[in-house]
Amino acid sequence: MSREHITTPQLISYAFLALPVAFAGFPLYILAPDFFATHYGVSLSLLGILLLAIRLLDAVQDPLIGWWIDRHRPSRVPLAGYAGAVLCLSVFGLFNIVYFTPAVWFSISMIAAVSAYSVLTIMLGASATLWTTDKFDQTRIAAAREIFGLLGLVIAVSAPSVLGRVAGPDTLYLWYAGILSLLMVLGVCFYARCNVHPNPARLAASVAAPWPYTTALKLPQQTRRLLAVYGLSMLASSIPAILVVFFVRDRLGAEDLLGAFLLLYFLAGVVAMPFWRTLSQRIGKYQAWVASNVLAVVTFIGALTVGAGDLWAYAAVCLASGLTLGADLILPPSLLADHTHTLGRRECAASDYSLLALIAKLSLALASAVALPLLDLAGFVPQAENSTRALIVLSATYALIPCLLKLAAAGLLYLFFIRSQPGDHHENHLSNLSARGTYHA
């Protein structure tokens, strides 16, 4: 691997593919449950069960996808093309046609879509890890990828309201699928031009034969701790993502402003991304991540107090909490890449990155399995008149539980990586392990 200069055009060519992937992810993880509940009458409890099963299946296959990429190292451009085509077709099918029953079609379309989504995200993450060994460049690459991902979300959030006026509600998602296909073609073409591995011979020499699957999943203690903290943080983010449509429409009474609120949140994340990259270089990646978790609690707890008509207050919550989004996006993959290199696990780059995807999806699965049935038990009904008790449960599930999880994540980061190993001792410790070629599993 190299420490040579990574140019801005290279970064753009690599990162642009994250834009259509994120554009596709928004309807999959945010809009689809509400779409099938309101258009086809699928109950929240059934949707929660289906989403749990789909995301558990998706999560289990992520390490297998990572291991397969490590083992076979397929040509990245054809792989991106195949996975991109499946993702586009699946999103089209999910929102525009129905075969069998709605619940069965929802399951089939979602499984195909999230599988293709996984291949693309794991391939992008593994490419970044193998691109360079420099820890600051890893943060720079992650920042570029996530900025384009957030831009994809910004476009995705804006698209339904814009297309609803231009194309009408009946053809809205047909146009959405068309825009996704165009962006995906552009993303694959850009990715084909990027020079992620400028010297294939040197790459082959530096990466030995892939390890067996069981070895790829045998992780050192510090990496396990990192993934545990990431899991808590992702669960805290997943619960509001699952419930935001219900909260804005049924709690605030502002369904027409859902896109504007999400746009404000993601734009704040884009704007703040360079700040978190700079802060991580100055005070350390773990310290910056702790700071972002604490700030997320301080800003997002305000959502617990907003009610019907409190639009400006909720907009302020979206803006302030969105500023912390960048840290959650760029710091975990950058830290994991540091572990992969310093512990001599370059043969398992895709397998290691796949664990981040696995944890993110397990978090979404757990969030769906807990939050949706909890609302059902409280008597909450989407797009209907709800009791005060049901709306209080909605607010508490949406805001209070995520804040408690974020506090727990910040505490574990401090205990695992800052208090026990102050300063740069942790990074030096990893470097020493790398030099010896050993680690404790």
Image (cartoon, rainbow, N blue to C red):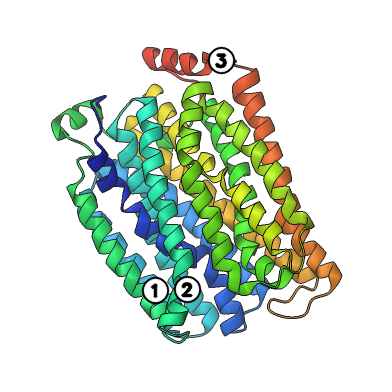
Q: In this rendering, does residue 220 appear at all?
A: no
Question: Of the residues shown, which amino acid type is indicated by label 1?
Answer: Tyr
Question: What element does badge 2 sit on?
Answer: helix
Q: Distance between the residues labelled 1 and 3?
A: 48 Å
Sequence order check, earlier mark of 2 and 1: 2
**Image position of 6 (left or right of 348):** left
Question: Of the residues shown, which amino acid type is indicated by label 3?
Answer: Gly
Label 2 crowding class (10 Å Cα cut-off): few <14, some 14-19, many 20+? many
Question: Of the residues shown, which amino acid type is indicated by label 2?
Answer: Pro
Q: Which mark is residue 160?
A: 2
Residue 348 at x, y percent in the picture: 36, 35
Sequence order check, earlier mark of 2 and 3: 2
Q: In this rendering, does residue 209 appear at all?
A: yes
Camera-nearest label, 2 or 3: 2
Residue at 28%, 67% in the rendered image: 182
Sequence order check, earlier mark of 1 and 3: 1
State yes or no: discs 2 and 1 in contact (Cβ < 8 Å). Answer: yes
Q: Which residue in the structure is indicated by mark 1?
A: 176
